[in-house]
Amino acid sequence: MNKENQNNKTDANQQIDANTTKEQTQDELETCKKLSNEYLNNWKKERADFINYKKDEAKRMETFVGFANEGLILEFLDIIDNLDLAAKHEASAESIKQIIKKTEGVLKKYDVERIKTDRAFNPELHEAVSTTEFLDPLKQGQETTPREDGGEKIEEVRAGYTMHGKVIRPARVKIVK
């Protein structure tokens, strides 16, 4: 009988262990499901917060860009005021030159420089609008002759500018051969 009692006890213990293990597994599964849902909800919340952050940042950047050149515009408004005064008082050429100098100073402050046209033609800096033959003023009435130095000279038609070393508007020039 001892063996039977021991077998019955072992069977009963195994059933209790199996039930306990099943209950523990169910509890662990419920805990994992709760954690999984919690993590998923936290992730969704963070994702929504990030999307809202991106939208807010885009609005801030749009506002920043809108007012980024405010200082530059204010400086040009001073120049326009000077031009208005010059027009009202039929300004002399000297006062117009002063206004141009002030304008060039504002441009220089923002690293905008005028392209020099005292050098040879450079297609990266200059845009040729016409080509003419050199007329020697000493040989009036004679047919056109090439320049004696064999080179080309360029005459500025419209100023060109660079900003931070990059051409933002090429100089329009007339080539004299």
Image (cartoon, rainbow, N blue to C red):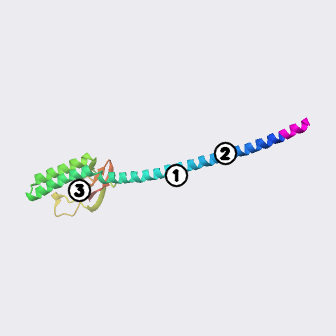
Q: Is residue 121 above or below residue 1?
A: below
**Residue type at mark 1?**
Lys
For residue 177, above or below residue 43: below
Vertical position of residue 16 compared to residue 63: above or below: above
Of 168 and 42, the residue lying toward us: 42
Element type at mark 3: strand
* Dot 2 or dot 1, earlier in sequence: 2
Q: CA distance from mark 3 to mark 2?
A: 90 Å
Residue 121 in sight in this render: no
Give the structural element (helix, strand or loop) at label 2. helix
If the image is split into quadrants, where does the N terminus sit?
Answer: top right
Highlighted range, magenta: 1-9
Q: Which residue is located at x 25 percent, y 47 percent?
A: 108
Q: What label sits on residue 155 in the rendered view?
A: 3
> Where does residue 30 sit, x and y in percent of width and height?
64, 48
Magenta segment: does it hold 7?
A: yes
Position of residue 143 measured from the top left corner of the image (x, y, whole percent): 21, 64
Return the residue found at the far left: 89
Earlier residue among tags 3 and 2: 2
Q: Amino acid at mark 2?
A: Asp
* Residue underneath mark 2: 27
How far apart are labels 3 and 1 at the CA level? 66 Å
Residue 54 in view: yes
The quarter of the displayed image where residue 173 is located: bottom left
Give the class, few, some or many, for how many residues have Cα within 10 Å of label 1's Cα (few <14, many ≥20): few
Residue at x 19%, y 63% (from the top left corner): 142
- Residue 44 is labelled as 1
- Between the residue at mark 2 and the residue at mark 1, the CA separation in whole angstroms equals 26 Å
